[in-house]
Amino acid sequence: MSKRKQFRHNSAPVAAAGEPGQAQVGSPYWLFGVHPVEAALANPRRRLHRLLATAEATSQHAALIQQARARPQGAPRLETVDREHLARQIPAGSVHQGLALLAEPLPPADIYEVCDDLADAPHAALILLDQVTDPHNVGAILRSAAAFGARAVICTERHAAAETGVLAKAASGALEHVPLVAVTNLARAMQTLKDAGVWCAGLAADAPQTLAEARLTGKIAIALGAEGSGLRRLTREHCDMLLRLPTAGPIAQLNVSNAAAVALYELARGRTLPLRNAGG
């Protein structure tokens, strides 16, 4: 394979929030649970409004409460409430651990910013999600992305999980660390990544070669489709290679979040190996 040209976004126009191709900035929503709340309090990009805490949580998490009071970007209003009041603010049955934080959505991330971040990186991993709609899966993928040092998770703008408290809870704080980039056209975003020197590998059960056998290194984006339907035709066509995970047994396919974790681990494990095409 010839090396692709490097890409740095200097003068190409970037759509402002609200223009086509950009994630829309939504209404404030509730984050809940210790890890999502703590990570949001530490994120200077977050605009925060209210922090609800039960008396028990206030006692147990005194350092977190102090972090909220001392936040230089603007402290949220602190309110001590009972568990029933707090539970009414969030989805039924959610595990909140006595904490809920009303926050603005994160500023929309941009595909060109991701490419700029990759310009001088010899190795990088990204995840591409082709219409993955379950917020628990997307949150779990963000958590794995943070654990294995992935630079971004890129998803479709439509037919995808929105930034919500449920997604943030599943991400366990990773939403504050890994950009979740929504794009209008995933195939076009893949071409932008290719222009930035990124190789796109799609996971497909019918692929002839496993991810481990491909021995990938460099800048790699792993594309995963929704459970059941998998990658769409156009997404498959824009992949440089199709690879599979070596599953066997009565259940041959992994949950998409588990597949992402295995793929990211394999990329991390093989960073010292040479890049070669799936065809050899």
Image: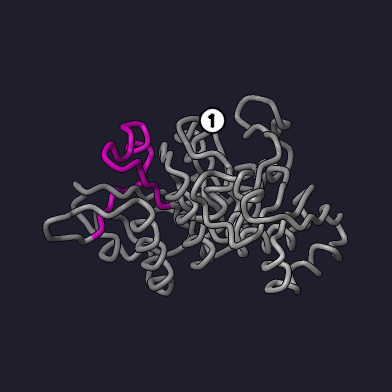
Q: Residue furthest top?
A: 20
Query: Which quadrant would the N terminus be assigned to in this image?
Result: bottom left
Q: Position of residue 56 (x, y in %)?
A: 67, 68
Part of the protein shown in magenta: 222-245
**Label 1: element kind:** loop
Identity of the residue drawn at 32% across and 39% down = 231
Q: Is residue 212 visible?
A: yes
Query: Which quadrant would the C terminus be assigned to in this image?
Result: bottom left
Residue annotated with mark 1: 184
Identity of the residue drawn at 66% across and 48% down = 85
Residue 111 falls within the magenta-colored stretch: no
Which of 112 and 98 lies nearest the eye of the viewer?
A: 98
Which of 245 and 143 lies nearest the eye of the viewer?
A: 143
216 relative position to 46: left or right: left
Identity of the residue drawn at 62% across and 25% down = 20
Which amino acid, mark 1? Thr
Badge 1, how many Cα within 10 Å: few under 14, some, many 20+?
A: some
**In this view, 239 is above or below 16:** below
Q: Position of residue 130 (x, y in %)?
A: 41, 39
